[in-house]
Amino acid sequence: MSAGAGEEMAASSGVQLLVDLLTMEERHVIVTYRLYLATIHELCAQLEPDLILAIRHPTGIPPLVQVLSVLLASGSFQTTVSIASEMSQPMFSNMLSRVLSALLKHMRSYIIFPQVEDLPTVKGDFYALGHIPNIIGAIDGTHVALVPPAGVNRCTETGRAIIQ
């Protein structure tokens, strides 16, 4: 398949991603992308200047499609998402790098650590939610399987790998 044909397939699958997003119920959007629809649009608007520059071809992938594809991917599912979105795996990998780089520029808008003076209030608020003491933060809970490198049989008590 030529590079142009791959880009055309990615563009057509991108249209399908957009159609799917527009017809999904809000709860399905949250389950699929782990974000509210309004948040996805805000995120795309914020990342668009970085992602639009990456489109060098008329059939380039729109920023919203880039973000949606990356939100679908996690861990070893990169290949699965690239197949489902009809992109080559290298094309998806390049797009993933661009979106993640753009996200890193704005991470302080989305990742907020409590200040030391706020810790008692934060702990109290989390305790009120789940009755678990001393919690100061949470993550979204997306699980990614971690596989040790080849040759690593076990780890020491300090977490260092033993390679045999």
Image (cartoon, rainbow, N blue to C red):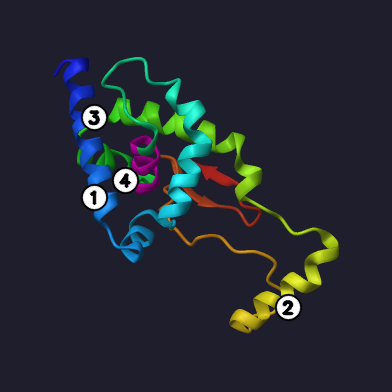
* SS at mark 1 in the image: helix
Task: Judge the density around disc 2: few (<14), some (14-19), many (≥20) Cα neighbours within 10 Å.
Answer: some
* SS at mark 4 in the image: helix
Q: Which residue is mark 3?
A: 11
- State the image quarter where residue 61 is shown: top left
Q: Residue at x 32, y 31 (%)?
A: 92
How far apart in space, not on screen, are marks 1 and 2 (Cα)?
A: 40 Å
Q: Which mark is on residue 20? A: 1
How far apart in space, not on screen, are marks 3 and 1 (Cα)?
A: 14 Å
Q: Nearer the viewer, mark 4 or mark 1?
A: 1
Is 26 rendered above or below residue 11?
Answer: below
Residue that protrudes farthest toward the right in the picture: 117
Q: Main secondary structure of the magenta part?
A: helix
Q: Work out whether residue 144 or residue 9 is closer to the camera in this orientation and state it.
A: 9
Q: Which residue is mark 4?
A: 77
The verdict on residue 68 being magenta is yes
Q: Amino acid at mark 1?
A: Asp
Is 81 rendered above or below residue 4?
Answer: below
Mark closer to the chain start, 2 or 3: 3
Residue 25 on image: x %, y %: 29, 63
How far apart in space, not on screen, are marks 2 and 3 (Cα)?
A: 48 Å
Mark closer to the chain start, 4 or 1: 1
Residue 22 on image: x %, y %: 28, 51
Query: In the picture, which quadrant includes the N terminus?
Result: top left
Report the magenta residues as a range.
65-72
Q: Amino acid at mark 3?
A: Ala
Q: Which mark is on residue 124? A: 2
Task: Judge the density around disc 1: few (<14), some (14-19), many (≥20) Cα neighbours within 10 Å.
Answer: few
Mark closer to the chain start, 3 or 1: 3
Q: Amino acid at mark 2?
A: Gly
Q: Residue at x 20, y 42 (%)?
A: 16
Q: Nearer the viewer, mark 2 or mark 3?
A: 3
